[in-house]
Amino acid sequence: MATFAHSIVHTFRTFEQVWEALVVDIREGVLSSRVTVPSIRLTVSKLLKPDPELADTIYNKCSRLSNWYDLIPELFPNTRQPYLKKLRHYSGELPLLSADYGSSEGWVGVNVNLKLPPELVTYAVLPNIGYFEFIPLGGNLNGVEQAYSPVGLTEVKLGEEYETVFTNFAGLYHYRLGDVVKIKGFHNGTPELQFVCRRNLLLRINIDKNTEKDLQLAVEAVAKRLVDGKLEVVDFTSHVNVSADPGHYVIFWELSGEATGEMLQDYCNCLDKAFIDAGYVSSRKVNAIGALELRIVKRGTFHKILDHFVGLGGAVSQFKTPRCVGPKNSSLLQILSSNVVETYVSSAFC
């Protein structure tokens, strides 16, 4: 059980890096010196006893895995419902369920059809959790702020998109969650929501409009080509460079291994073509939007971003890699830019 799927993914990515050292700790019953927090050392040391048999079991199971596929059922054979693309890799044939939809401010809805895959899941709003309102979007996610009239639970329309507004019993009043949701149906009168994207995560320069979901789909489409090279995208984010003329998209990738320059140039071109928004394609063809730029960053760069977040007082369980880095987030851009090792410019529309 975890609040966010990405926290599970982060845990297993860390496990990939330190599993052999963990096996040594279990075999010898002594905590490694790499753990420096006194309270953690004290607590774990009380629990840790030499267990060579368990250490051998873990070592043998991990050693025979192919690129960590099926990791979860191998280590935890009684697992039935772990908390998406990377999780499928770790969990193998185990079903992935998205149980509920919530935020730090409170729960919004629950999945009433557990047979649906996470990509298609809808959440029935819990009307007794708080007071919900919905701001009609009218198809414009990034326009100039205008006066709006939120509608209630019974006034939303099937197929329309809204931003969720939340008032809870703790006193949070008319709080805009920033989530864009689509009304997919009703369950006993309460709306069933499908999460679309975050309202402020939008790549836009001209008449283009690419959401976080569009970015995710584009990266996933190109990532399929990495399989042949036994590579994967460890993590990614984006930035709109409007200081150049014309402005263009910048995509940052952290890869699991090395790739040739020819391969990376091909990935860059494919990524540019993977954005199928009509406004983006037409703008690229007439050079109203410049060529997409793919920047490869060092291994561990996104972990540095996590460390930066935690250093500012954030909790690891609340961290989500920002998929679009705005110009105001200079510290994050600095971390990314200072760790770039290779840069490729698309020639897809030349």
Image (spheres, helix red, strand yellow):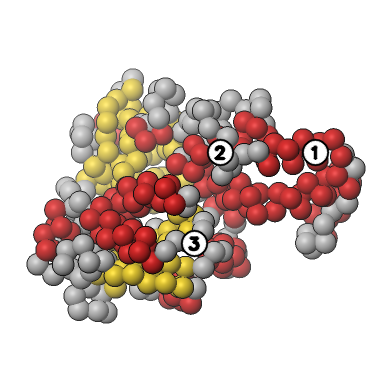
Q: Position of residue 171 (x, y in %)?
A: 48, 48
Q: Position of residue 183 (x, y in %)?
A: 26, 34
Q: Amino acid at mark 2?
A: Tyr
Q: Residue at x 54, y 64 (%)?
A: 299
Q: Is residue 97 visible?
A: yes
For the C terminus, the image quarter is bottom left
Q: Using a 10 Å C-alpha cutoff, classify the residue at mark 3 as few (fewer than 14 neighbours), some (14 to 19) or many (20 or more).
A: few
> As rendered, which of 235 and 232 lies closer to the eye?
232
Q: Using a 10 Å C-alpha cutoff, classify the residue at mark 2 as few (fewer than 14 neighbours), some (14 to 19) or many (20 or more).
A: some
Q: Quadrant of residue 267?
A: bottom left
Name the disc covering residue 115, or none: none
- Can you name the residue that lies furthest to the top here? 188
Q: 257 above or below 1?
A: below
Q: Residue at x 34, y 41 (%)?
A: 195
Question: Cβ–Cβ below 8 Å for labels 1 and 3?
Answer: no
Name the disc covering residue 69, or none: 2
Q: Position of residue 83 (x, y in %)?
A: 53, 36
Q: Secondary structure at mark 3?
A: loop
Nearest-to-viewer mark from 3 and 2: 3
Give the residue number, with chain letter if any, for mark 1.
56
Q: Secondary structure at mark 1?
A: helix
Nearest-to-viewer mark from 1 and 3: 3
Determine the CA span between mark 1 and mark 3: 31 Å
**Of label 1 and label 3, which has the lower sequence position?**
1
Q: Amino acid at mark 1?
A: Asp
**Of label 3 and label 2, which has the lower sequence position?**
2
Q: Is residue 198 visible?
A: no
Number of marks in the image? Answer: 3
> As rendered, which of 349 and 186 lies closer to the eye?
349
Q: Amino acid at mark 3?
A: Glu
Give the residue number, with chain letter if any, for mark 3.
258
For the N terminus, the image quarter is top right
